[in-house]
Image: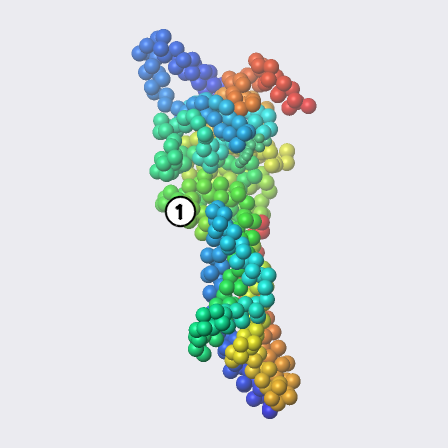
Amino acid sequence: MSEGMGAATGANISAATSAITDAKGNASSSVAMTATPILHLADAHKAFGENEVLKGISFDVHKGEIVCVIGASGGGKSTLLRCLTLLDHFDRGELEYDGILVTKKKAVRRQVRDKVGLVFQDFNLFPHFSVLRNITDAPLKVQKRDKAEVMARAEQLLDQMGLSDKAKAVPCELSGGQQQRVSIARALALDPEIIFFDEPTSALDPELTADVLKIMRDLADEHMTMVVVTHEIKFAAEVADRVIFIDKGLIAEQGGPQIIAHPQSARLQTFLRKLEV
Amino acid sequence: MTIETIIKLLLINALGSLQIFCYSLIGALILGVLVCFLRMRKFFLVRLITQFYISVMRGTPLMLQLFVVFFGPGLAFGVSLGSGYKFIAILIAFILNYAAYYAEIYRSGLVSIPQGQYEAANVLGYSHLQTFFRVILPQVVKRILPAMSNEVISLVKDTSLAFTLGFAEMFSEAQNIVSNYANLWAFVIAAAVYYLFNLLIAFIMNRGEKKLSYYHE
Ligand SMILES: Nc1ncnc2c1ncn2[C@@H]1O[C@H](COP(=O)(O)OP(=O)(O)OP(=O)(O)O)[C@@H](O)[C@H]1O
Ligand SMILES: [Mg+2]
């Protein structure tokens, strides 16, 4: 826990220093140089017809950071994640991974896709594959990695997820919580640099939610870079280095996890109050 | 006429039925893929034409379609296509007709696969082909197998329609025997052969369904 807090202050300081780069000149610009963010998003817009969903979202995610995104239903959180994971594309704005600008070019998208993982709300496991094959198929067939290495990694992931005895099971034989853990393992097996979660526990019963959140806490402790859309406010307050509150297509407030206990803006206050009841 | 002779005559002619069945099945399975593909195109004219073709094939009697294909060229253009054309005409009519049904079954299977499967494959980096062959197709096969069983079985029975063109297959032979020798056994035995053959098909399809029942949804 104390590590998490430390990282949060670190991120705040680096954000602050890069903000005053112009004023201070060379010394601080070298600080900014060393920290190319894994994810850089600037002024992202997205509309579905008349419905403007994202109206200029900007944020960076640095290596090892855990960013939680909160906001009202229909506020565009899933849309944001879908665009960030290249399932869809922004109408306008700039998206960079490791300094690589994402364009519509196939080669670029393929290169970038390797860096990102996504965990869906409703798992989307492949029902006809065993648990093990769900985890190993993409590393073997897409990344064409060595079989022994992929298998070893899969075993280790299954162990980490507490699912070692389920390797041969098919998804329909698992509980929702177990399925979600498989899908987390599936995403991790590709060794992404950043992993996105879209409400990973909202399809789960409360007692199963805890298992999945525990896995995500473990990942946070290992400094996996994560962007988590969640309604689990307690989880966000405990685990996040940074919390982003999206309202009406814009970031209405962001900051360290303390903003959940002490929201500054009226809109975040209202949002949090509604969640309590 | 002894029962043995009847069985022998019917089985000899069953070969004709089997030929119609096998060629039509293979042809329709393949053409069905193309029709399904066209039916699902974005370009609306292609979709519209395909939809029209499917609705005509399903909305008019197969026997009438047989006649159109067989007599059509002669009536419309005055060409005579020789005696070999009979078998070809039968295959054309059967393939065109069944491809429409199969295409709709394929399509129903395809659209029933949740969008999330495509998205998961996409995020994991599967190419379009990999997504189709590794993720989508196996699930579609499982979903459409029961409907396909029905259509394959009805194709077996429909081969008897070839008798309307006087093609030598089992049913026309049974018809011959009954009218020439007043022996109703021919119908009974023909029925038994169709039935047993369909039992075999049902058995095979069932095995397939069982094999794929290791998972659901
Ligand atoms: N493919 C689409 N076509 C048209 N409109 C869409 C599409 N996807 C999302 N929308 C619209 O975009 C808006 C934002 O949806 P989105 O799913 O991103 O919200 P969300 O913040 O994830 O909500 P929730 O918390 O309920 O998951 C909604 O008004 C939705 O109707
Ligand atoms: Mg959502």
Residue at 39% over, 10% down: A20
* Secondary structure category for the residue under label 1: helix
Q: Where is residue B135 in the image (x, y as percent from the top left)?
A: 48, 49
- Specify the farthest residue to the bottom: B1
Observer-nearest of A273 and A64: A273
Question: Quick one: quadrant of the N terminus of chain B?
Answer: bottom right
Q: In which quarter of the image is residue A28?
A: top left
Give the answer, above or below, for where B7 lies relative to A53. below
Q: Is residue B169 shown to the viewer in this render?
A: no
- Residue at 56%, 76% in the rendered image: B164
Residue most toward the top?
A: A23
Q: Where is residue B120 in the image (x, y as percent from the top left)?
A: 49, 41
Q: Is residue B157 or residue B215 the one in the foreground?
A: B157
Q: In which quarter of the image is ligand 1?
A: top right
Q: Eyeballing the image, is B4 above or below A87? A: below
Residue B51 is at least partly visible in this image: yes
Who's the residue at 51% across and 80% down the image? B168
Label 1 Cα crowd, 10 Å radius (few <14 / some 14-19 / many 20+) = some
Query: Residue A202: image x %, image y %?
Result: 60, 33
Residue to which mark 1 is pinned: A141
- For the residue pair B128 and A245, the one nearer the viewer reads as B128
Residue type, numbered disc 1: Lys
Q: Nearer the viewer, residue B98 or B203?
A: B98
Q: Residue A84: percent from the left, percent from the top?
A: 46, 31
Instruction: Give the image's coloring scheme.
Output: rainbow
